[in-house]
Amino acid sequence: MNVIGKPRRRVDARSKVTGRTRFADDLALPRMAHCRLLRSPHPHAEILAVDVSRAAALSGVYLVLTGEAFPVSFGIMPVSQDEYPLARGKVRYVGDPVAAVVARDEQTCAEALAEIEVKYRPLATIASPAEALATPEPRIHDYGPQGNIHRLQAYEFGDVEEALARADHVFEDVFFYEGNTHLAIEQHAALAAPEGEGGVVLYSSTQNPHYLHRQLARVLQLPASKVRVVAMPNGGGFGGKCDPANHEMVVAKAALALGRPVKICLNREEVFYLHRGRHPVLMRLRTGVTKDGRLTGVHLQTLLDGGAYGSHGPASTFYTGVLTPTTYELPRFKFEACRVFTNKPPCGPKRGHGTPQPRFGQEVQLDKIAEKLGLDPAELRLRIAVKPDSLTANWLRIGSTGLAECIRQVVERSGWKEKFRKLPEGRGVGLACSAYMCGAGLPIYWNKLPHSGVQLLADRSGQVTAFCGATEVGQGSDDVLAAIVAEVLGIAPDDVRLVTGDTGLTPVDLGSYSSRVTVMMGNAALRAAEQLKARIAAAAAEELGVAPHRVAFANGRVSVAGEPSKAMAFREAVELAEARFGTLAATGSYTPPKPAGKYKGAGVGPSPAYSYSACVVEVEVDRASGWISVPKIWIAHDIGRVVNPVLARGQVVGSVYMGLAEALMEEQAFRRLPPKLSDALVHRIPSILEYKSPTSLDMPEVETILVEEPDPNCPFGAKEVGQGPLLPVPPALANAIYDAVGVRIDELPITPDKVLRALELKAQGKNPRIGPEAFPAVPYPKPVFVPPPWEGGDGGEAKRHDAAAVV
Amino acid sequence: MMRLPWFECRAPRTVAEAAAILAAEGPEAMLLAGGTDLLPNMKRRHQTPRLLVCLRRVEGLRKVSNGAALTLGAGLTLTEVLREPRIPAGLRQAAAQVATVHLRNMGTLGGNLCLDTRCTYYNQTYEWRRAIGFCLKKDGEICWVATASKRCVAVSSTDTAPALIALGARVRLVGAAGEREIALEDLYRNDGIDYLARRPDELLTEVIVPDRGWRSTYWKLRRRGAFDFPVLGVAAAARFAPDGTVLEARIALGAAASRPFLVEKAGAFLAEKKLTDEVIAEAAAIAASRAKPMDNTDLDLYWRKDVADDFVGYALRDLRGDDMRAVRLRTARYLPGEPPGLS
C-alpha cells in the first residue's frame, strides 16, 4: 500500500499550526449581532416571572428571548427530550440558561443581562445520588421510573449467583470514579445566519451535525430542508460537543427572528456548566474466580450521578455495564445500573463514554485477585483474555483481538518481570487492559439507514472531491477520509479535496462519537472509491488496450499492472472516464452488522469491531508526603491496521494524557454551602486555572506500541484509536501505587492526601485502603434474563431456569 | 468572552506624576503594571476602578543597581528577575516558578509583591459569586471558609515576597506627600481584604536587597509544574561559617496565611548550629507549626498542613548543599538554573 500505514503529515496540519484553520469563533459575517445567555444563580428553583422590559429598551439591544420563545423540548436521546433552549418554568442547576440577549456587541449583551429581572422560588437542592435516592420530592423532572431516578436497567446473562456460589473465591469491592470534564481548548461557539427563503444556517463547533440538524429543525419547528448545520473544525471535542446545545438553538432562532447573523461564544465557565462530561459513578463489583484465576461470573452494580438533564444518560447508563465482558472470558454476567438526577450540570459522553469507570473497578479488582491467587497480573490476564471470533455472555460479537499481544508487548518493553514487586519501596509498576468499541452498532434514534455516506466527484481537471458528513474534531477524521480515497485511487491524500460536516452539502454521517469514524466513514469511503476506480479503470483499460482488472492505480498514474511503461497520468484517465460516462460521481455507504442479541437493550454495546489496549504505568510515591510522580508509561494498542502512524500515536498519547489526568487530578466537583445559611450548590472551580489537569511539564514519557490485528469488518482492517487507550491508564496507575507502597486507593482521582492517609492507616496496622465503604440500596428492577450463548437460547429474553429461581 | 468593565486610563511619565494622580483620584484609581492579576480580576468584577494608572512609561522602574545593597525596580518583569545573575538564588527561584512563561514576561516584581489575596470563594466570576450570595472579601458579609470569622482569610499567594523576606529585603513606597522605606514583612497585614500597608496614594517603586552573601532558596508547593499559585511557599536564607555552622538564618512562609511572614523562632533556633538532620527536622517543625492553611486553595487542607515540615526540610537541606535536584523535579518539575519552560 502506498498511503495506508505510512507516516504522513496530516492533511490539515499546516493550516492548523499556522492558524489558518477557521474555527467557529473565527467566523464573522456582515451585520453580525452578538448573543449572551442569562444563567440561573439557583441550583433548583421555580421561575415565577421574567421581566425583560428594561433590557429590551437598552440602546444597542436587538432582541431578548426567554423560554416562551421555545415551546418544543429537545435532547439527543429520543427517550430523554427534557431540555428547552431557555428554561421554562423551572431551573435545575446553577448555570441553566434562562434568557438570551442579542445586541450589537458582547458588552451591550452583558449590560442588558444585568437588567433582566427573574423572580425565583427556590426548591430543595438535590446535591448527590444519595440525596436523589432519599428525596423523591421535589422531582427535578416529571418523568423517569420514580422520584429523582432517571434510568434503571438490570440484565442477567446466566445465573450469576449460582456462578459465584461455585467459585473458589468471590471478591467484592466498591469503587468510585469522580466526574470530570472534557476540557477542550476551544470553547463552544456558534454563528447562525438566515439562508435562502426562510431558512437558517448554523456554523458551530459540534461533533454531530446530523443529530443537531434534526434537533434544530424540531425546536425551530421548521422542515429539515430549511435548516443547515455546518460543523466547523473543532478545537477538541472529547464528547463535549456531541449534545445539541442551548446556545445553538438560541442563535438560530435569533437569526431567523432578526434576519441577520447572530453569534455566540461561551466563556470557559459556561463550558463547565454545559459540561456533558464523565459521570461520577459509584460501583460495586462482585466477581467469582476459580483458584487458577478464571472468572466464573461478575455481578456489577453502578450508580451514576447524572446531573440535571438526560443528555446521553440512557446510553451512558448502559455503557457502565455492557462492555465489561469484552475484555476477558466471562461465562456469566449481571449488571444493574441506575442514573439519578441532581441539581448539577448534566453529565454525558466523554472519551470512553461510561466504560472507564467500570474498567477502573474491574482492573483494580483483578490486581487484587492476582495477588490473592499468587499469580502475576499479566499472566492472569493472558490466561483469561477474550478469544477472537467469539460471543460474550451478553451476545456481543468479538471479531479480531490483539489483547494478548498488547499484554506481551508492554510486559516486555517495560521490563515488567524485573520490576513487579521487585522495585525498592516507593517505586512500583501497575498493569491494566481494556477493550473499546469501534462505533456504536445502532444509531441514537431508531432507523434502518446507513450510518455513514461518502460521495466522490471527479472531473477532467483530475481533482477528486470527497463529501462526507463526518466531522473533524481534531482526531484526524479528514486525514483518514483523504487517505482511504487516495489509497484506492493511487493519488496523494493532499490531492483529495474534502467537504465534510455540512448537512446541506454532504451525505449523512452520524458524527464523531463512539470511535466510529474510521470504521464507518472509512468503509463508506472505500466503497465509493472502489466504484469510482472501476469507472476510471474501464475507460483507461480501453485506451491501454487491456482488460479493466489489469489496470493499476499508484503514484498519481494509471498503468497496466506489471508494465509501468504503459501508463497515463491519473488526470488523463479521469478525463477519459468523464468522456465515456459523463459526470463522474460515486457514492458509498455503510451500515454496521446486525447485533447478535435480540433482547430489549441489546442495541447498546454491539460494534463492528473492538479495539484492545494494555498499559504499564511506573510510579514513584514519596512516603513522607504521598506525592505521586509518574516517570514513564508504556501502552500497546491493537488498532487493527494503522492508517497514519503519526495520527495514531498522537491519539494514543492524548488518551494516556487524559486518562492520567482523570487518575491524578481532574474533578468536576461541587460545593454545597452550609444548608442553614444557603441553598447554593456551585461548581467548585469552573476555571481552567483551578480545574487541575496536567501540563506538558507534568506528562511522563509515553512509549507507544501499535499492534496490528486487522479486522475484516474494518477498512483495510483499521480499528479505532481515539478512546480505547484512555481506559487502562487509571487502573494501571492505581495498581502501580499499590506495588510502590502497598496501599489501595479505590477511588479517583488519586491525590497525595489520599495516599498519605492510606499510608497512615498502614502504619497503624489498619486496612490501608481509601475508597467508598458501602453501596446504597438502589431499587433496581428484576433483571431481564438472557441465557449466554453457551447456555442455549437465541439471544432473546428467556424465563429463568427453575432451579436457579430458588437461589 | 469575558469583558472588562469600562475604565479610563492615564499613562504618567514619572513616579511623582503617578503619585499625584493617585493622590487626586483616591481609591477609585488603581495601578496597572503587567496587568496579569488586575485585568482578569476586573473581568470578574473583583476590582472595578474608574481609572487605571499605567506604569509602563514611568521612568526608572526597571533598573537594577548595585551599591551597598542591590536595588531592583518594581517594574522589572519576573522574566527579567529570574535572568538577572546579581539577584540572589532564592528570589530568582521564586520568580521562575510564578505562573507561566507568558505571564512572567508581562508580570512584574512589584505586581507580584502586591498580588491580591486569593480564595476559592473569591476568585470566581461575578455570576458565580452571586450564586453563593457573595462573601466577606467582596460584595458580601459572610466568610464561607470560616463562617464564624470576622476577618477575611483569603491567602497571600505571592512567591517573591517570602523569598525577599527571607533575604531581609526592604521596599520603597513613594507618595505625593513623600517617601518611606520599610521592611518588606511590614508591607503586609494578616487580613485578606486590607492585606497591604501601602497607602492608596503610594507606589511601590523599589525593592532593596541587602548584599550579605547569604545562601538562599525557595521551595514552592503546588499541584503542577506550571500555572499554579503556591499552596505553600518556603523561603530560607542563611549565612554560614566556613565549618558549616549557621551564623544567621531566616525562614519565611508564603501561602500559609493572609500575609507572607517570617518565622523568627525557626531562624533563631538555627543560629550557631550545624544543619544536621536533627536540627533541620526541629527547625522544620517550628516553622511548619506556624502554617495555618485554610480550606480555600487547591489541595486538601490537612495534607497541606501535614507536609509543611517536609518542604521546610527540603529548603534547609538545599541550603546545606544536599543535591536536591531529584526532589525538586518530582515535586516542582523545576530545576534551579535551568530556563523554566521555554523562556
Image: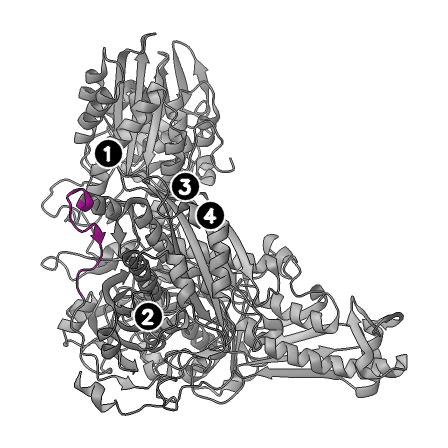
Whether residue B143 sits left or right of residue A189 in the image: it is: left
Dots 2, 3 in contact, CB < 8 A: no
Q: Count all numbered tags in the image, as a single digit.
A: 4
Whether residue B105 sits left or right of residue B28 in the image: it is: right
Q: Which picture quadrant has residue B264?
A: top left
Dot 2 surroundings within 10 Å: few (below 14), some, or many (20 or more)? many
Which range is magenta? A761-774
**Chain letter for the residue marked with disc 1 in the picture:** B
Instruction: Tell whether position A769 is magenta.
Output: yes
Dot 1 surroundings within 10 Å: few (below 14), some, or many (20 or more)? many
Q: Which picture quadrant has residue A351?
A: bottom left
Question: Foreground residue, B126 or A144?
Answer: A144
Residue tagged by mark 2? A295
Q: Distance between the residues labelled 4 and 2?
A: 27 Å
Residue tagged by mark 3? B226
Question: Please, what is the dominant secondary structure of the magenta stretch?
Answer: loop
Please report whichever mark, 4 or 2, sits nearer to the chain's N-terminal start: 2
Location of the N terminus of chain A (image quadrant): bottom right
Secondary structure, mark 2, is strand
Q: Residue B308 carries which label?
A: 1
Secondary structure, mark 3, is loop
